[in-house]
Image: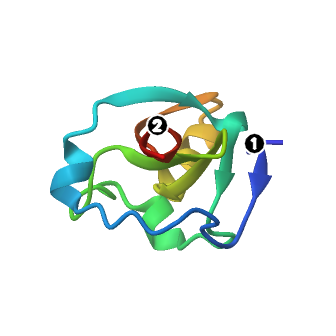
């Protein structure tokens, strides 16, 4: 299995982080098999695009909530990493457990 689980929603509370606030979080490597997705469908245009980060962050966005890691944004990056047989993805992690 590529991901820990495939979800279709965000079970954590709304965090209201802006893109600027996300960019202040340092990127780190996260194992794909530790991630739970928050989307179950992927837009192939995003996956196959040569420059899929043109309008967004270079790194995936992950939220830590109640000990689990949720892939909020960057599903196409994570799937691309899996297709390239890379077990990890670089992501910015918002730790809601630490905020609580």
Q: How is the image coloured?
A: rainbow
Q: Label 1, label 2: how many angstroms apart (C-alpha)?
A: 27 Å
> Measuring 53% from the left and 42% from the top, which residue is drawn there?
97
Residue situated in front as seen by the camera: 62 or 46: 62
Q: Residues within 10 Å of mark 2 (few under 14, many from 20)?
A: few
Q: Position of residue 90 (x, y in %)?
A: 43, 33
State how many labels appear.
2
Q: Which mark is residue 44?
A: none
Q: Position of residue 58 (x, y in %)?
A: 28, 46
Residue 83 placement: quadrant: top right
The earlier-in-sequence mark between 1 and 2 is 1
Q: Do the residues under discs 1 and 2 have CB atoms within 8 angstroms? A: no
Q: Residue furthest left?
A: 20
Q: Which quadrant of the figure contains the N terminus? A: top right
Residue situated in front as seen by the camera: 54 or 75: 75
**For the residues carrying marks 1 and 2, which lies nearer the camera in this image?**
2
Q: Residue furthest front?
A: 100
- Residue 27 falls left or right of residue 93: left
Residue 75's place in the image compared with 16, above or below, is above
- Residue 60 falls left or right of residue 52: right
Q: Determine whether the residue tagged by mark 2 lies in a helix, strand or loop.
A: helix
Q: Position of residue 15 (x, y in %)?
A: 39, 63
Q: Which mark is residue 98?
A: 2
> Measuring 59% from the left and 35% from the top, which residue is drawn there?
84
> Measuring 28% from the left and 55% from the top, which residue is drawn there?
53
Which residue lies under the disc numbered 1?
2
Q: Residues within 10 Å of mark 1 (few under 14, many from 20)?
A: some
Residue 92's place in the image compared with 28, above or below, is below
Residue situated in front as seen by the camera: 100 or 30: 100
> Measuring 73% from the left and 64% from the top, which residue is drawn there?
7
Residue 26's place in the image compared with 75, above or below, is above
Q: Determine whether the residue tagged by mark 1 lies in a helix, strand or loop.
A: loop
């Amino acid at each position: 299995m590529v991901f820990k689980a495939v979800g279709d929603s965000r079970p954590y509370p709304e965090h209201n982080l802006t893109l600027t606030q996300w960019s202040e979080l340092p990127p780190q490597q996260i194992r794909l098999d530790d991630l739970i997705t928050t989307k179950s469908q992927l837009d192939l245009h995003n996956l196959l695009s040569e420059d899929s980060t043109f309008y967004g962050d270079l790194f995936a966005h992950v939220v830590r909530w109640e000990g689990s890691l949720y892939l909020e944004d960057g599903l196409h990056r994570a799937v691309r990493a899996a297709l390239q047989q890379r077990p990890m993805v670089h992501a910015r992690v918002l730790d809601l457990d630490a905020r609580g």
